[in-house]
Image (cartoon, grey):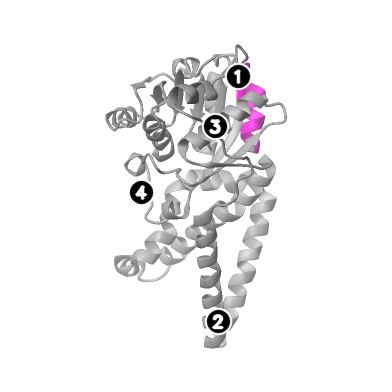
Amino acid sequence: METRVITIIGLGRTGASVGLALQKSQLDVTIVGHDSDPDAMTQAKEMGAVDETQRRLVPAAATGDIIIIAMPAPEVEDVLRAIGADVQEHALVLDLSNLKAPGQSWAERYLERGHFVGASPVLAADALDGVVRGLDGARADLFQDSIWCLMPSSSADPKAVETAVNLGRLLGAKPFFLDAAEFDSLVQGVETAPGLMAAAMFRAVTNAAGWRDMLRFAGAPFARSTEVLREGEEIAHLALHDQAATLRWLDALLEELETVRSWVAEGDRDRLVALLTELNDQRERWLHERAENDWEEVPQQDTGPPGLVQRFLGSRGTETL
């Protein structure tokens, strides 16, 4: 059957940006939004990210041909538990949280119907600087030239996976497949570790003598490096999801800090300058490669005008999805 209703659960920056991108695509569907915060639903509708809002979670999910869960990882289990018995038989349930293996496990436990696929947008380089969080940071082109990481379970229906691929293309992203456990292990290094580093840095400053004066004069570098603390609950969830991996990253960070500390203690300016210069060069290369985003594994297809796109998101004939 065709896709007629897309339900977005979670109307923060990611969820609202998905809605704005789909609206811009002129896809002939109704976009329903749900969030536990009534103000978020009101703002999302006023900005045009959703056509309708539904304050109750289960009815919102029950109407969706595609259900997009744009919630922090700690909240995904509660969502799947709540909607599991009411999802339509043909529905695609797309989890955009930043942990994938737990989502697959919860889907197997709670979803009585529907087809579950894990996805994660890896934003393009120009979306990494000056990030505005929450609904104020939502924009229709947020996913343009991004990577659409897909982690379907082994039991996922091929048509559900195809629908997930094409949804990502509508958002402007390129598909890239990998294993859920592999993805989660990589997240430990690039999301969990920076969050714990920010916590340690902020705590070190606030435990120091005269910390109020230091914070009074702290500038952009300190603000940027500790901004991730706004996601404190999610950082803690990530850190404890795979404690062994988290500990390995912390040990690696401590080893690097010990090396840098020894050079500072020795007054070795040449080594410090060389290290910082080399790392900056590597960072610039990373940003350049990220801007290229040439990781696509699935050949591009012309999805055609909106009417065809709608069928492309839907099914072939009368099959599910």
Residue under the point 45% across and 15% down: 59
What's under tag 1, amino acid-wise?
Gly
Residue 210 within the magenta-colored segment of the rendering: no
- Judge the density around disc 3: few (<14), some (14-19), many (≥20) Cα neighbours within 10 Å: many
Numbered disc 3: secondary structure: helix
Instruction: Give the percent coordinates (x, y) of residue 274.
Output: 55, 81
What's under tag 4, amino acid-wise?
Val
Numbered disc 4: secondary structure: loop
Q: CA distance from mark 2 to mark 1?
A: 55 Å
Kindly identify which numbered label has been placed on residue 38. Answer: none
Numbered disc 1: secondary structure: loop
Quadrant position of the N terminus in the picture: top right
What's under tag 2, amino acid-wise?
Ala
Residue under the point 69% across and 41% down: 179
Q: Which residue is mark 1?
A: 114
Instruction: Give the percent coordinates (x, y) of residue 309.
Output: 49, 26
Residue 115 within the magenta-colored segment of the rendering: yes
- Judge the density around disc 1: few (<14), some (14-19), many (≥20) Cα neighbours within 10 Å: many
145 up-or-down from 22: above or below: below
